Image: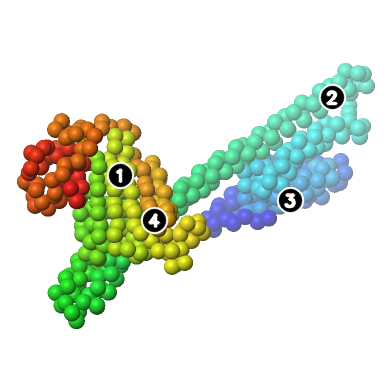
Amino acid sequence: MFRTLTRTQLIVDIVAAGVFAMFALLATLVPWGSINSAMMPQRIALIVALVVTLVSAGAAAIRRLSPELALIVCWVAAILQMASGLPPLPANIAIFGVLYTTAAYGSRRTFWFGLVSSLVGAIAIAVYIVLLPFLLGQWNGSGNGSGIGTYVFATAATFASAAFALLLAWTTGALVRTSLRARQNRRAQEIAEATAAAEAERTRIARDMHDVVAHSLAVVIAQADGARYAAASDPAVAAAALGTISTTARAALSDVRILLTQLRHTQAQGPEPTLADLEQLYAQVRAAGVALRVDVDPAPAGEVPAAVQFAVYRILQEALTNALRHGADAAVSVGLAWHAGGVELTVRNPVGPLESGLGGVGGERPAPESRGHGLIGMRERAQLVGGTLEAARHGDVFVVAAQLPNTRDGGASRAPRSASCSSTTRRCSVPASAWSSTPSPISPSSVRPGTAPKACGSCARRVPTSFSWTSGCR
């Protein structure tokens, strides 16, 4: 029933009501003898008029604190005034402010109570001022029909005028109420959007943290186990494993620091992994003892959007981490096919039987898969760039297959084929060591768009559309 107001609002309302009461009392007392009543002596009528004025001023003082109570007080003052037979008083102006606050700040019940009060009050004013004197015999007409018509017209005009004035105050409050509601809805929408944005940012950071920590810890654990077993028989292998652990941990620490910086400063944006960083990822997985085979056929023909590069890196990172942690055999194959409309990414690794505890990585049951963050994170990565991802067990092999768009506008020219390579086999039989430009296999991330292509050392063919870790050109 009572609203919460600030101290300033309370002080303003009380002071305004006091000023209003002072002017209303002054207008009631001057000129002296202006208050008359047919139902009581003039002195008593003046006392009642002063009481009505003070009560109306009190209603004006609490009009924002409790609009419903203020309206009830106004009705009490009006009934007392009409019961005493008093004429209209200056204090009656307070009803307009009360009706305004009932519509602007009152509850739903008070809102409609104010509307009904406006109509009923207009009827009461017309009856009290015009119709009641006629019924009490105070009409001084000549008794003909024209006098009665005049009273009917006066009653209707008085009702229309009073209803217009009272409803105008109530309607103004209703408009203010609508404006306040719209402002509150807009503020609530802004808060909801800010909350959703913060939640999305927390989800993104949690996903990145999972990718970084899970992958790095998997490599560190594998290297630590290998170093522990090799410490006695082959100290060199143990030292190399410790070096890999140090490098992996430092890289993970750097990534975590970047994520923490983003948490402290929302505008800070750290560097995101690209295709060029895949070599380091492959090296970490191989250092953990995994026989990793990477095939890229065909290679990207042009510049790949940064979002797609980031998605490819994170999906491969999570898939290789799962293979490292849950794979039954130290052999993983990665395939990347950069077509005109998108890239097809596949990761295959052998897995053990279902009862070996693969849970959300190798199981076919949907319930265990939904428990981990890895598969969910990979699907979200693919969906963020408009792609799809499927991860399921096929026999003794767990396959992660993703299809991602390769262009910002949904289309791009297909990679050109080499004129000297066969369009059917498109595979050179020369091993990787026969390349003239490098004695080691060529990785797709080492070839940048616009750089000079390399050539096969035996057939002198230009590098066509793809590369493999186990063959020269394809």
Q: Choose the circle earlier in sequence order: 3 or 4.
A: 3
Residue named by callout 1: 308
Camera-side residue: 421 or 292? 421
3D distance between C-alphas at marks 3 and 2? 31 Å
- Residues under numbered marks 3 and 2 in contact, where contact means CB atoms less than 8 Å apart: no
Q: Position of residue 389 (x, y in %)?
A: 40, 47
Can the viewer see residue 408 in this picture? no
Q: Residue at x 43, y 68 (%)?
A: 356
- Say which amino acid is labelled 2: Val
Residue named by callout 2: 152
Q: Choose the circle earlier in sequence order: 3 or 1.
A: 3
Q: Name the secondary structure under disc 3.
A: helix
Above or below 146: residue 15: below
Residue named by callout 4: 398
Q: Choose the circle earlier in sequence order: 1 or 4.
A: 1
Q: Residue at x 54, y 58 (%)?
A: 7
Above or below 292: residue 423: above
- Say which amino acid is labelled 4: Phe
- Residues under numbered marks 1 and 4 in contact, where contact means CB atoms less than 8 Å apart: no
Q: Residue at x 26, y 62 (%)?
A: 290
- Rendering colour mode: rainbow
Residue 73: assigned label: 3
Q: Choose the circle earlier in sequence order: 1 or 2.
A: 2
3D distance between C-alphas at marks 3 and 4? 78 Å
- Say which amino acid is labelled 1: Val
Camera-side residue: 454 or 451? 454
Disc 4 packing (10 Å; few <14; some 14–19; many ≥20):
many
Disc 1 packing (10 Å; few <14; some 14–19; many ≥20):
many
Disc 2 packing (10 Å; few <14; some 14–19; many ≥20):
some
- Say which amino acid is labelled 3: Val
Q: Quadrant of residue 95?
A: top right
